[in-house]
Image (tube, grey):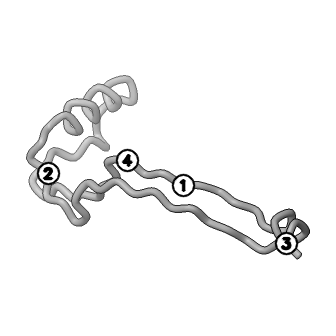
């Protein structure tokens, strides 16, 4: 049993507040000067009026792999 434990590798993956959204009614930012794009993106992201494709979720997964 001890040798089998040494042959397993484990990784834990945690995801918090993962979401995907596509806002169809928004201003395009590509024509803004590069110095203004980051500020404009921050303002867009602060809005809570998103059209979610995937609602915010949290998850935890423990992956085990046999390395023998």
Label 2: which secondary element: loop
Badge 1 is on which residue?
13
Q: Is residue 1 left or right of residue 20?
A: right
Query: In x, y percent, where is residue 68?
Result: 89, 76
- Specify few, some or many for label 1: CA neighbours under 10 Å numbering under 14, 14-19, or 20 or more: few
> Exactly how many numbered labels are in the figure?
4
* Precedes in sequence: disc 4 or disc 2: 4
Q: Are marks 4 and 2 in contact (CB under 8 Å)?
A: no
Q: CA distance from mark 1 to mark 2?
A: 26 Å
Q: Quadrant of residue 47?
A: top left
Rounded to the nearest whole Å, what is the CA distance between mark 4 and mark 2? 18 Å
Q: Residue at x 31, y 43 (%)?
A: 30
Could you tell me how far apart the alpha carbons at marks 1 and 3 are, in whole angstroms? 26 Å
Local SS, label 1: strand
Residue at which label 3 appears = 1
Which residue lies under the disc numbered 2? 50
How crowded is the residue under tag 3: few (<14 C-alpha within 10 Å), some, or many (20+)? few
């Amino acid at each position: 049993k001890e040798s089998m434990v040494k042959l397993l590798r484990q990784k834990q993956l945690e995801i918090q507040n993962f979401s995907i959204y596509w806002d169809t009614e928004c201003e395009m930012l590509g024509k803004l000067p590069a110095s203004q794009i980051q500020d404009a993106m921050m303002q867009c992201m602060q809005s809570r009026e998103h059209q979610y494709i995937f609602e915010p979720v949290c998850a935890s997964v423990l992956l085990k792999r046999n390395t023998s």
